[in-house]
Amino acid sequence: MSKRDHLQFGPDVIGYPLLFVMLLWIVFWIESRFGINLNKYGIYPRTPAGLIGIFSGPFIHGSLKHIFNNSIPLFVLSTALFYFYRNIRWKVLLYGLVFTGLATWVIGRPSLHIGASGVLYMLVAFLFFKGIFSKQFQLTALALAVVFLYGGLLWYVFPIDPKISWEGHLSGFFVGLLFAFIFKGVPLENKKYEWEKEGFDEDNDPFLRQFDENGNFVGEPKPEETIEASSESKGAPQVKVTYTITKSGNNYA
């Protein structure tokens, strides 16, 4: 879809984010239902075997609290991404997942890193910085809403809790910031008023015709009236008189 297309809240805007979150819960249900532990498929930094976690790690969560804390923000932020940035949404989401995981694999501690919080931080950073850089009021408002709702997440890019993968959070944050610079262009159409468009003719504009040359409001122009006058004499030529009544200021002309 072109960036100039009118924004519409179609089923894909909410459907794909919902499917993404559902996949997280399906994996968690399978682990709980069948007693399977998939943590070994998380990201283990700087090992060849740990590379698989770049793709599988975001779908694995260690507890009900862990997946619940990620699910609602992921759904809200990915929906905002799919609605406002639909021309680049898949690139941001898929590339963001891969590069966030790769950065975590490079800088992470030698332990298993699981969960979708790295993608969550990527979305927060991208939506905020892209919205500020765009200088469009809709996206700036979105950026401020993201800060209001999830600004507290910023603390968790620092190693304040050894049980939390702050490396994944930090990786996602910088990937989102980088994407805000990389993905150029204006995602929303800057609509112009009729009088801002090229070729605008003020003399034929219905609104401006209600004002005289001094800027006084005179209302809609009166329709032309036609009077036909005929001679009493048979065969005399017909005379057709046409006149127009206008107002100038407060006086009739």
Image (cartoon, rainbow, N blue to C red):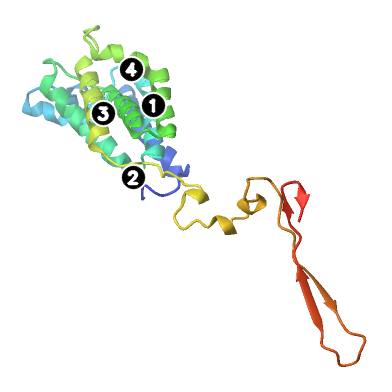
Q: Earlier in the sequence, mark 3 or mark 4?
A: 4
Residue 208: % across, % down? 61, 51
Q: For numbered disc 2, what is the local secondary structure?
A: loop
Residue 147: % across, % down? 38, 20
**Residue at image coords 40%, 32%:** 139
**Residue at image coords 20%, 33%:** 98
Distance (Cα) linking label 2 and label 3: 17 Å
Residue at image mark 4: 66
Q: Earlier in the sequence, mark 3 or mark 1?
A: 1
Residue type at mark 2: give it: Asn
Q: Quadrant of residue 142?
A: top left
Q: Quadrant of residue 238?
A: bottom right
Query: Contact, CB < 8 Å: mark 3 with mark 1?
Result: no
50 is higher (above) or lower (below) than 10: above
Residue 18: % across, % down? 40, 34
**Residue at image coords 28%, 28%:** 59
Residue at image mark 2: 87
Distance (Cα) linking label 1 and label 2: 18 Å
Residue at image mark 3: 176
96 is higher (above) or lower (below) than 194: above
Residue at image mark 1: 143
Query: Contact, CB < 8 Å: mark 4 with mark 1?
Result: no
How many numbered tags mark residues here? 4
Residue type at mark 4: give it: His
Q: Earlier in the sequence, mark 4 or mark 1?
A: 4
* Residue, far bottom: 235
Q: Earlier in the sequence, mark 4 or mark 2?
A: 4
